[in-house]
Image: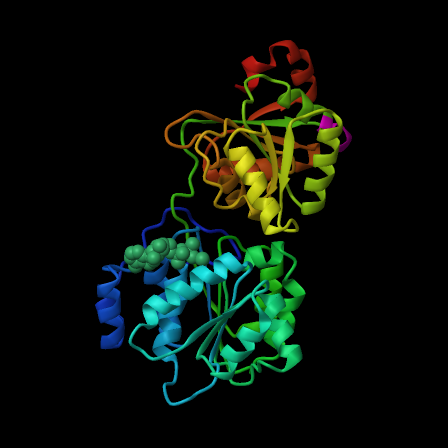
Amino acid sequence: MARNYSPVFTEATPSEPVPSVRFSELGLSEGMQATLEAIGYTEPTPIQSATLPVALAGRDVIGQAQTGSGKTAAFAIPVLERLDGSRSEVQALVLCPTRELAAQVEAEFERLAKGSGFGVLTVVGGDPIHRQMEGLKRKPAVVVGTPGRILDHLQRKTLTLRSIRFAVLDEADRMLDMGFAPDVERILQQTPRERQTMLFSATVPGWIHRLVERHMRDPQTISVSGQAELVDTVSQWCIECSWADKVEALSLLLDSPRVTCGLIFTATKRNADMLHTVLLGRGYDVTVLHGDLSQHDRDLALKKFRDSKVRFLIATDVAARGIDIDDISHVINYDVPGSPEDYIHRVGRTARAGRDGVALTLITPIEILKIRDIEKHTRRAIERHTLEDLQQLAGTVSAVVG
Ligand code: ADP
Ligand code: MG
């Protein structure tokens, strides 16, 4: 079946079948085929199926797929296959948003590089810089790092990117959310233009479009959406109110005893902080999760929410990715999601594992078109309500939102 590689610039088509190729059909080296067999990768995942032929041919690639879809090997295999064994210099640079993700990428590279003789070094903040300097002197073929620490080495001249032939931006949307956009640009500017660039991300916000225009050459966009569909057990509501009444509307919702465990989404980190302060001021049991917080604070917020030590969690889209909690009763969109895909991702946090769930979206009157867009995309109706409805039903609001 011919696959429509729906460009992320328009819309991703959920759940589209991807023709599967076998690893044996990709012209991989014998060593790589043996490694894949040894680690138990019998078949490529859909994103690997779709990106490997393109990336192995040397083309720039934008790969969009959910967390856990095997994106790391989708770039690690082509990079390792295309490295030049006769050169002893840094040939590939992989940028990751956090040290944890960098460590995961390094581990996958090392598994796949086994027997190839290519060295992989991780360069992230928080680790002793002198040991990294020693490692870089040995000219590993692949450097995996976080943008801040990579820049640090560039400034100290303990790393140069002149010999880079492959640049990978992994989890690009999270890099943006963590404020790394300018660093990423500065790093890419120091790499040769003739490199192959691969970008992987679960979502493709505006910054990525601009970055792509500036730094990628005629990239092929491949978008594979796994299970990104709304389940039948989720009820969807939108509540129309003025901008100024949003906190009021939200409070009415949070006061419902049926909202046992609510995940509240905002469009920006600033809105998240603002709302956090306002809700705390109103006495709500709430915490916040976004990319400007330290890893420790993010872990803590998530743990408290998971362990039901706090009833409400405010989060930005990207920070909430991968939140794996099964019994979130309500997802509340304080700000309308930027795209129908974001809506589906957000709402996918509730009604998991066959449970019921409720999705509530606050909208200002001019945002009704966005709701229509979401309805069209999900082919599911969202019930319309107003703040007045909520106020009237305040006493019995649980009957409405639960
Ligand atoms: P992503 O970056 O998309 O979140 P990862 O690259 O971290 O996903 O992969 C998720 C998991 O899937 C990892 O445990 C990885 O080892 C495994 N995996 C990747 N590719 C394959 C494959 N072809 N067959 C089996 N498991 C795979
Ligand atoms: Mg990944």
Magenta stretch bounds: 243-247
* Vertical arrangement, residue 212 with respect to residue 329, above or below: below
Using the rendered image of the protein, determine whether residue 137 is visible from the camera's viewpoint: yes
- Dominant SS in magenta: helix
Left or right of residue 353, residue 149 in this image: right
Q: How is the image coloured?
A: rainbow
Whether residue 79 appears in magenta in the rendering, the answer is no
Q: Residue at x 43, y 33 (%)?
A: 326
Of residues 128 and 283, which is closer to you in this image? 128
Q: Give the x, y percent position of residue 203.
A: 52, 53
Furthest-right residue in this view:
244
Quadrant of res 233: top left
Q: Give the x, y percent position of residue 317.
A: 57, 45
* Vertical arrangement, residue 73 with respect to residue 402, above or below: below
Q: Residue at x 60, y 17 (%)?
A: 256
Q: Give the x, y percent position of residue 200.
A: 48, 61
Furthest-top residue in this view:
395
Of residues 368 and 350, which is closer to you in this image? 350
Using the rendered image of the protein, determine whether residue 45 is visible from the camera's viewpoint: no
* Vertical arrangement, residue 161 with respect to residue 354, above or below: below
Quarter holding the N terminus?
Answer: bottom left
Furthest-bottom residue in this view:
86
Q: Residue at x 54, y 74 (%)?
A: 132
Q: Give the x, y percent position of residue 336.
A: 62, 38
| Quadrant of picture, ligand 1 | bottom left
